[in-house]
Image: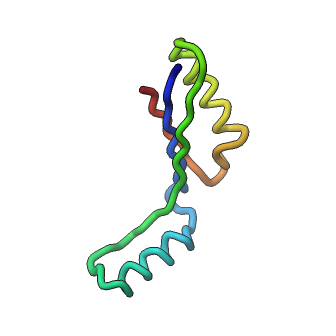
Amino acid sequence: MIKARVTVTLKNGVLDPQGKAIEGALGALGFSGVGHVRQGKVFDLELEGADKAKAEADLKAMCEKLLANTVIENFAIAID
């Protein structure tokens, strides 16, 4: 069994209204000095098998087809 984590974030230059709302809420809660908040997604997956190269190729395909909108998002894959 292979465990993997996929992190999806917005590309630089893409507006992040949810990140901006979080930034404002943190300020309203008294957390000063917080800026440039960017929001993202994390997926933890378990894949059958032991071939890490195949797992990485499969994960990349999953990101390109479903997990990330590659027009506006970047993704990073970490395999344990």
From the viewer's perspective, tell me whether residue 56 is left or right of residue 71.
left
Frontmost residue, 9 versus 79: 79
Residue lying at 52% horizontally and 62% vertically, measured from the top left: 13
* In the image, farthest residue toward the right: 65
Query: Above or below — where is 62 with respect to 36?
Result: above
Q: Residue at x 64, y 25 (%)?
A: 58
User: In the displayed structure, does residue 18 sit left or right of residue 27?
Assistant: right
47 shown above or below 22: above
Query: What's the residue at 50%, 45% (across, down)?
Result: 7
Q: Nearer the viewer, residue 60 or 2?
A: 2
Q: Position of residue 47 (x, y in %)?
A: 59, 24
Q: Is residue 65 above or below residue 32?
A: above
Residue 21 at what x, y percent from top left?
50, 78
Q: Number of marks in the image?
A: 0
Q: Residue at x 72, y 38 (%)?
A: 65
Colour scheme of the rendered structure: rainbow
Where does the C terminus fall, quadrant-wise? top left
Where does residue 45 sit, x and y in percent of width and height?
A: 56, 34
Say left or right for 70 vs 51.
right
